[in-house]
Amino acid sequence: MEFKLNIFTLNCWGIPIISKNRKERIIALTKYLNSSQHTIVCLQEIWSENDYLYLKEHLRNNLPYSYYFYSGVLGSGLCIFSKWIIQDVFFHQWSLNGYIHKIHHGDWFGGKGVGLCRIKCGERLINVYCTHLHAEYHEDDIYLAHRVLQAYSTAELVNLTKYPADVSILAGDLNTGPGDLSYRIITQLPSLIDPYDIPFEGTNMNIKKPSGTSETANNSYTDKKLAESSPEGKRIDHILYHVNPSWEAEVVNFGNPLEDRVPGESFSYSDHNAVTLELKLSAVKSKNDQKQLKMDSCFEVTAVQAIKVCEEAIDIIMKSKKLFLTSGGLLFMFLLGTVGFWPNKIIYDIVKIVITGFCFYYILMGTLWNKIEMNSLKAGLNALQNFNRRNTEVTNINTTLEECKDIE
């Protein structure tokens, strides 16, 4: 008994008004998907509901089942298309997702999270998780703790829901590459396999592994300086999978499926490159669990590093709280102390309004917003610490049992 899955993922860069050639690219993507053999499609940054409805309408013959994950102010930007019926759906919105005052980044307004569609293919169940983690934006990466806890929350969801599915697929723009802390959290906790790490042999030796998926030289939207300094870009878009012990998976195809340019045009399908993965799954009688044990052991080290990131972020938030409240308090006292001294002119009224706005902003950031972020960080930190405590206790119990056996 065997069956095949052909998965496709792409960050579509579909921001209304801002994204270049958005409508033309959506139309071109639709044409490609209609001519392809993909059975499951995961898209990110579909920020316009009209774009989703266009895709849904024009893909209904080949991919008749779909789901859009509504969330936040703008929507999560996530949607899944499937050849087979979508049996169950679930969306988990992250509590930490950027800052409301970073309007130019916009992640907070999207209400990002991870969406799950449980797909039924005959008697088989397929869990498909689509997600888009917070980007770095700057070299100092002020969102590291946010992304680490998003990765942990995603990994926990996959780990808790992957059974009884026969196969689980996590696809999307993870904004993290191999070796990064967030990447290790996502792959190690739920034991997700990155097909890039599989040594292809025999009939699979001709498979061309995907290159970078963001800021690559072959993409028309990549900055020329970045393209020259790092032509391969970053591999931050992934398709990862976990197979139930009663099945084994063979990678049939894996790579970047789209052409560098939309046919007949001078631009690419998106500012990211797409990734595709084709798996052939076969039933087996038994499966070795040694890899699972190894992954659990690796995650203990990763969890300690994640805890350190969270603790450092909490220290920074405590310091920023003092800074915001001090600044807000000084402005408030200044406004209070200068009552009656301002000349009755429009320009001074404008100055007072501006100062009042800053005063309100600082006090709001030092109280309400600071408390929200602090509680979200504490929630993630407690979960990570609980994982470490659980593993320590299990290890101690196993050691005690072994000692008892030796005595007997």
Image: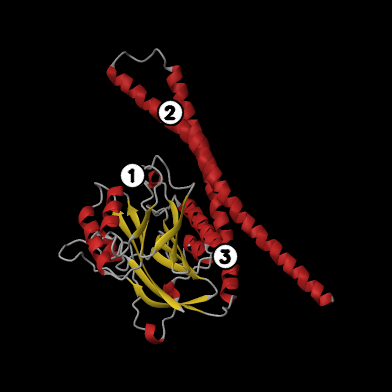
Depth order, front residue of 156/387: 156
Residue type of the residue flagged with mark 2: Cys
Q: How many residues crowd mark 2 within 10 Å: few (<14), some (14–19), many (20+)?
A: many
Q: Mark 1 packing: few (<14 Cα in 10 Å), some, or many (20+)?
A: few
Dot 3 or dot 2: first in sequence order is 3
* Quadrant in the rendering for residue 361: top left
Give the SS element for disc 2.
helix
Residue 359's disc is 2
Question: How would you rate the neighbour count of disc 3 (Cα within 10 Å): few for under 14, some for 14-19, many for 20 or more?
Answer: many
Q: Secondary structure at mark 3?
A: helix
Residue 251 visible in this rendered orientation of the protein: yes
Which badge, 1 or 3, comes first in the chain's sequence? 1
The numbered disc on residue 210 is: none
Task: Between residue 82 and residue 362, name the one nearer to us.
Answer: 82
Q: In the shown orientation, is residue 302 left or right of residue 33?
A: right
Question: Residue 283 appears at what percent x and percent y?
Answer: 50, 78
**Can the viewer see residue 48?**
no
Local secondary structure at mark 1: loop
Q: Which residue is mark 3?
A: 299
Task: Find the distance from the CA under tag 1 to the CA under tag 3.
Answer: 35 Å
Comparing 94 with 145, the one in front is 94
Residue type (three-letter) at the residue carrying disc 1:
His
The residue that mark 1 highlights is 104
Percent from the top left, x then y, of residue 394?
70, 64
Real-space Cα distance between discs 3 and 2?
44 Å
The residue at the far bottom in this view is 202
Farthest residue to the left: give it: 264
3 and 2 marks in contact (CB < 8 Å): no
